[in-house]
Image (cartoon, rainbow, N blue to C red):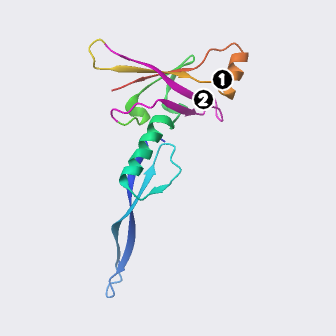
Amino acid sequence: MGAAVVTQNYKTTWHRNPVSGHEWPTHENIESFSIVGGSSTGGTFRSLKKAEEHAEFLNRWCFMIHAKQLSISGREFTAEASELGFAPGVIPRSMLVLDCPEKGQHRSFDLAESVPSLDGEVTAFYYEETDGPNRKSDRSKGLGPFKITVFND
């Protein structure tokens, strides 16, 4: 999980020394790009521009993290942006938290607001839980929504 990043695909060719039998690979870049990490499904792209656009889309709208990456107090999670794999200057608009709060449950969160500190050194990003099957179950029990605070570092 973490941020989706673009990688260049390559072709591997193995060579063999006929005298010693020693083998070694060489890698040749090909005009194909893949996205790894995030919620990528492993698609390939023929242009770097299209791959970067898709990675940006995934990082803004389909960001997934695991609950164990967050500290929890009551129904409020906290974390630092670098620990979650946020790319510098990129703040996801929404994210999916896996195994939240228990294994097998997933929760969706949307960015509610961002508040810079007085000295401008740190910004807090507040995410609020959106409706989903697990949220409806909590609501029927009288429980408030989960919240996430992410601090840039």
Residue 43 can be seen, yes or no: yes
User: What residue is drawn where x is 51% and y is 38%?
Assistant: 62
91 drawn magenta: yes
Numbered tag placed on residue 135 in the rendering? 1
User: What residue is drawn where x is 44% and y is 38%?
Assistant: 59
Above or below for 137 versus 24: above
110 drawn magenta: yes
Earlier in the chain: of badge 2 and badge 1, it is 2
For label 1, the crowd category at 10 Å Cα-Cα, with few meaning under 14, some 14 to 19 and many 20 or more, is some
Q: Quadrant of residue 2?
A: top left
Quadrant location of the C terminus?
Answer: top left
Q: Residue furthest bottom?
A: 19
Q: Are marks 2 and 1 in contact (CB under 8 Å)?
A: yes
Q: SS of the residue at dot 1?
A: helix
Q: Is residue 117 left or right of residue 63?
A: left
Report the front residue among 77 and 90: 90
Amino acid tagged 2: Arg
Q: Quadrant of residue 12?
A: bottom left
Residue 2 can be seen, yes or no: no
Q: Determine the CA span between mark 2 and mark 1.
A: 8 Å
User: What residue is drawn where x is 44% and y is 46%?
Assistant: 54
**Span highlighted in magenta in the image:** 88-117
Amino acid tagged 1: Arg
Q: SS of the residue at dot 2?
A: strand
User: What residue is drawn where x is 60% and y is 18%?
Assistant: 145
Name the residue carrying label 2.
Answer: 107
Q: Quadrant of residue 75?
A: top right
Spot occupied by residue 18 in the image (x, y as percentages of width and height): 34, 87
Spot occupied by residue 98 in the image (x, y as percentages of width and height): 58, 35
Numbered tag placed on residue 114 in the rendering? none
User: What count of labels does the image hold?
Assistant: 2
Above or below for 119 versus 97: above
